[in-house]
Each structure stands twice: as structure tokens, then as C-alpha cells.
Amino acid sequence: EDQVTQSPEALRLQEGESSSLNCSYTVSGLRGLFWYRQDPGKGPEFLFTLYSAGEEKEKERLKATLTKKESFLHITAPKPEDSATYLCAVQEAGTYKYIFGTGTRLKVLA
Amino acid sequence: EAQVTQNPRYLITVTGKKLTVTCSQNMNHEYMSWYRQDPGLGLRQIYYSMNVEVTDKGDVPEGYKVSRKEKRNFPLILESPSPNQTSLYFCASSSLAGGNQPQHFGDGTRLSIL
């Protein structure tokens, strides 16, 4: 069964304390892997798309990387405004369905 | 402003009373989709549409219907709602040009079925 698993479920960091979020997936072929940020009461907001192993993308304090079985979202020197739930989604090759992980709730303390 | 608009944002109703949640996008996107979000289960895809008159099931289609008669609209229909359909629902859209364009999400519809 195709699955997307995110860890940890929740993470508390002090401002400036860097860390990584993990997204592991099991699909027979990857069309794309997506990272989203979701704030309370809002819909998910797009961050990155990754297509193939070895690819990396960066935006401000966030960097996403991809291997054949997992993706990492690295957060460097986070700020309180980075507090949100981070969602990972996978689209399997040959299909236009999406499978989402259950997310990582990040809290950054000032 | 590019956006996906869902209505209503909140709805409390009773078992068996048919309801429709509307979704409209102003970006001329081909792909539209509905999700439900439940604690501990994450976002699960209900139905998606590749274009007008083209729809397909996601992972949890039971109890839902959709239609795509116009490119901008993709309503979600609950013919006979039941309490297990109480959830937070999101509509999303994306372009299919160039492969994997990211989805744009609406702000959600919170449905409570008593």
C-alpha cells in the first residue's frame, strides 16, 4: 500500500535552533513530492516540489532534499513565525492522485 | 488575486439532508480536487478532476459526489450526509502544464453533521 509517513509528529524548538523534519514514502514510482505549510484555520500553502533523488530546493530558512525513499525539510535558525504544521505529499508516477502525510506540528519559541 | 473560494466556510446540518459545498477558482486551472482533513489522519483525497467532464476517485470517495461542468467550478455533493462525514474539507486546484504544478488550496469548509 502506498504510504507517506512524517516524523516527528510534533517538534518544539527554541528560536535559532536548527532541525529537520522527515517524510518517508513508499510508492512504486515518484511523479513528484511536495512540501506545504499549514497555519491554523487556513488551507495548505505551497513551499517546494521535488522530482528526483538528489534534488534540493531552498527558500529563506527552509531547505528541502530528496532521496529515493525520503525527503527532509531542514529549518535553519528558525523564528517564531515559522511555527506551523508542515505537510508532505506524494504523487505517484502514472496517476494524478495525491497522498499526504499527517504532518509535523512545529512550534518555535522566542 | 489568484484564489480558490469555498462556500460555505461553516455548516451545521442534520443526517440525511442533502448539501453542496461549492468551489471556484480564478486561475484557469485544469486540475481540481477535494480533500477532507481529520485529526490523526491528515488530508485524504476524495475526488479529483483533470478537466471539464473528467473526474476520478481519490482514496475516500464513498458518500460523496462531484461534477465538473465548467472549468472554474467543482462542487462537492453529499446526497445523504452522515455523522462520519463531519470534517474539515478543502478544495484545491492546479495547472497541468509542464507536469507537477503545485496545488492552490481554499481556506476550508468545516462541516458538522448531527
Image (tube, coloured by chain):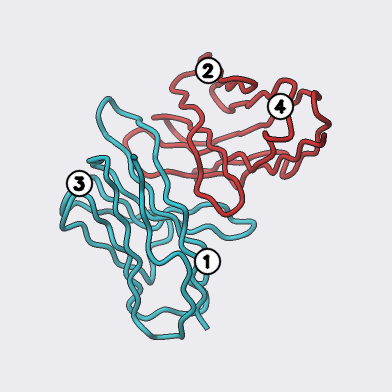
Chain colours: A red, B cyan
Q: State the image coordinates of residue A83 (x, y, percent, origin top left).
A: 69, 39
Asked if residue A94 is positioned above or below residue B45 in the image, the reply reads: above
Above or below B80: residue B101: above
The residue that disc 3 covers is: B51
Cα distance in 3D space between marks 1 and 4: 30 Å
Spatial CA distance of label 2 from label 3 is 30 Å
The residue located at (38%, 58%) in the rendering is B6
Mark 2 and mark 3, same subunit?
no
Mark 4 — residue?
Answer: A20
Q: Residues within 10 Å of mark 3 (few under 14, many from 20)?
A: some
**Tag 1's secondary structure?**
strand
Q: CA distance from mark 1 to mark 3?
A: 26 Å
Q: Which residue is mark 1?
A: B87
> Is residue B76 toward the left or the right of residue A104 in the image?
left
| Type of the residue with mark 4 | Ser
Mark 1 vs mark 2, CA separation in Å: 33 Å
Amino acid at circle 1: Ser
Is the residue at mark 3 from the same chain as the one at mark 4?
A: no
